[in-house]
Amino acid sequence: MTWLAWRFARRELRAGVRGFRVFLACLALGVAAIAAAGSTAEAFRRGLASQASEILGGDLALTVEQREFTPTERQAILAQGRASWAVSARGMAQSQAGARRLVELRGVAGDYPLVGKLELKGAPDLAAALRPEPDGTPGAAVEQSLLDRLGLKLGDRFLVGNAPLIARAVLIQEPDRLSRGFALGPRVLTSLAAVRGGGFLEPGLPFAITARLSLPPSVSPKQATATLRRLAPQSELRIRDRDDAAPGIHRLIDQLEYFLGFIGLASLVAGGLGVFGAVSAYLEAKTPAIAVLKALGADGALVRNVYLLQIGLLALLGVAIGVAIGAAAPLALGAMIQGQLPVPALFAVYPGPLIKAAAFGLASAAAFSLVPLARTRTTSPAMLLRRDLKGRVGFGIEWVGAGLAGLALASLAVATAPTPIAAVVMMAGVAVAFAFLWALGLAGAWAAGKVRGRTSGPLRMALANLAGPGSAARTAAPAIGLGVGLLAAVVLIQSSLLRQVSEVAPRTAPALVFTEIPGDQAAAFDATVTRAFGAPLTPDSYLRAPFATGRIVAVRGAAVVPEAIPASDRWAYDNDISLSALGPEPANAGVIAGHWWPADYAGPPLIAVEVQAAKGGHLKVGDRLTVSILGREIEARVAVLRKVDFGGFGANFPLVLTPDAVAGANLRHVAIAKASRAQEAAATLALGRDFPQVNVISVRDQLEAATDLFARLALAIRGAAAVAALAGLLVLVGAIAARAQGRAREAAILKALGASRLQILSAYVLEYGAVGVIAGAAGVGLGYLAAWPVVTLVFKAHWSVDWAGVCALVAGAALIAGLGGLAASLQALSKRPAEALRAP
């Protein structure tokens, strides 16, 4: 029986795949998107893995903050292999002309770099770049942006804080830069001795020292890590090995792969209607052949298997086309932008992502094509000879297969996602959206049938077609709506976040942040800023507070175990976090539980805790909290739980203690200010004269850089989301193609009854344009529902609607659908009435 089915299938396939072009295009598009996303992500993973030692700067990296390594720690590190040392700090660079800029200062010693190559321009090597002058002034390698900002050239002297340096080389690339993350300013590379001599390693200052190790071949990073932990069990060492060289980038790649892959999956789901329609149209065209086979004694299973084999082979072809495109796209992309990538990538053909994409494609093909096949098995020869394939399909093995395929599709999406819960939510959202759009299409067809009797002319013909059995509202509207919905969600998320960084944040956030203000000179600092601003400082425009960092070490008397806290809430318990000591309640304190202490409070230590920080330790008002600050443990009672807007203007500290809790500690202060560009320039210049050790961070510059980066990423993200919209367009094309012959008959009859070409054209454009409007509006609504929680709950940003983008999406959907109707009418009118009516 199987061999006979194969013979029939092979003979029919000799006629070509004309009826399956949309089928192939829908499958290939979704598979290509998933394969391209997976292959690109794998290229970056392989690139990172191949240069893991270079990215980390060695086999191991050990970091301590706000202190130097002890002699015991240094000895233990040196016993493991070759070592280099690097200290990171921030300071204000100042030219002799008075121009100033915050820089990331880095001092190195030992065999730096252990791994990789340091790229310099203007000096033959690092030793020459850092060589001190006869008067002892150290040399430095600086980024070109700093030379441009300060008006320097190689050989010029400049200050970082109070430390004099000479710019001897332009710093092009450091091998371990990627592992260190984001920088607030241009980088300055000098010797560790120069940084120490400049006073940047004084107790209490925010600096970090990292030792990098190159291990002997006989020692693995895991062994060395275990040894160092045993030799220095009490030290607060943060140890990373080459397998964890850039954890943040790995997570970003995982999330980006899933986001792009999800768009591809949504395209497969949207294109599923195209698959369903193409299979249904193909089988309807084969009605006479199926009827003859059944009349000659072929049973339903044989007929189903004939077409199952054909569809299976064509599905394999569509998947193969998609896999080929998905494998080639990253190679082409890599050839174009390889030299511009900030992350190493090895573009090649990787089987894993291609196999995953193929599995998605085959599962999608099965889920959407098996039900139409059931009709060939259950429909009687008499109905087939009457060309009636619309009979009721009872429950059978095809339904079971379609259900299992759909379950496999969902299971694959969840199993391959970096966060399964998010995958379940997204898949459920797509399923609900698809069901809603399907129901909306049915409702639109029903409403058209009810209304058409009250209209006349082309509008009545359009409504009659919408209400008919081949209505595009049932076939194309769900796919178009899903595509528009994805695009709308991306547009709305992007517009809200872009407005957040370009408009909302500059209006609500400070323009300047001042750090490293000496606590005993705070009043003099305020006076300098007042003179520079040319106006009195008010609480609405200026805020200064003591600043320190500390670590929560115990909650309710029990030691904190970070591993027992959910990863999303662990940030406040596995690292030092910022804190302050305030008496009076600050403006916009955000108190949600408890009461702020009196301004003159002088009792046992109290503490105010940010609500998200409190969540990890299940803290409530009245609980005891122990914080380690400057080597001293302070136990305080939780008096306040508060909500903090970390990007706004206020006392944005996760922890705030009563002043007496840190009495005697000469804490440095931080200050924030709202200022114009002129005030910013004046304050930066004045502080360079009176307080050169104070760092001035321009929030405005950082926001402008973020806006530029986000705007450049937005275009790429919109382009990826447009893949789903393209799938909806393919379904529309399929719907038009499936009814081409029927449309030609309709047009011929209408012309014979006296309808003009303009009336027929208008009817078809109105029909499909209405489908576009309905699907576009519904898609925008679904995109709104998807985007709002992402913006407000995930990104904690202000919700903003890009009405121009939303209207453009609805208008675009209507226009494209209307053009489809125009194409359908032109095709129908291209045949003479007699020819169309004589066609079988």
Image (spheres, rainbow, N blue to C red):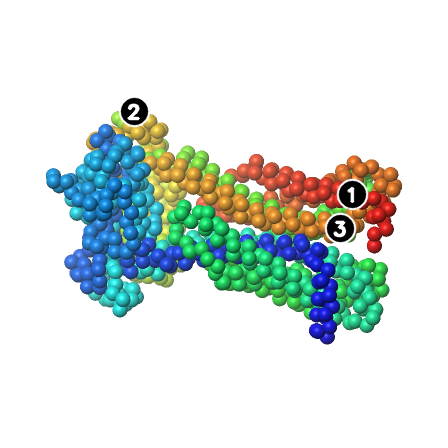
The image's mark for residue 830 is: 1
Circle 3 residue: 739
Image x and y of residue 700, in percent? 37, 35
Q: Residue at x 62, y 66 (%)?
A: 404
Q: Residue at x 81, y 68 (%)?
A: 294
Image x and y of residue 609, in percent? 35, 49
Outermost residue, left side = 135
Q: Quadrant of residue 3?
A: bottom right
Q: Is residue 161 visible?
A: no
Task: Say if 780 sits above or below 634 in the image.
Answer: above
Q: Nearer the viewer, mark 1 or mark 2?
A: 1
Circle 2 residue: 534
Question: Which quadrant, please, contains the N terminus?
Answer: bottom right
Outermost residue, bottom side = 1
Camera-nearest residue between 119 and 615? 119
Q: Residue at x 32, y 30 (%)?
A: 680
Image x and y of residue 201, in percent? 19, 47
Could you give the CA–CA distance between mark 3 and mark 1, rounded to whole angstroms? 15 Å
Q: Secondary structure at mark 1?
A: loop
Task: Say if 579 sits above or below 368 in the image.
Answer: above
Q: Nearer the viewer, mark 3 or mark 2?
A: 3
Q: Nearer the viewer, mark 3 or mark 1?
A: 1
Image x and y of residue 808, in percent? 60, 38
The image's mark for residue 113 is: none
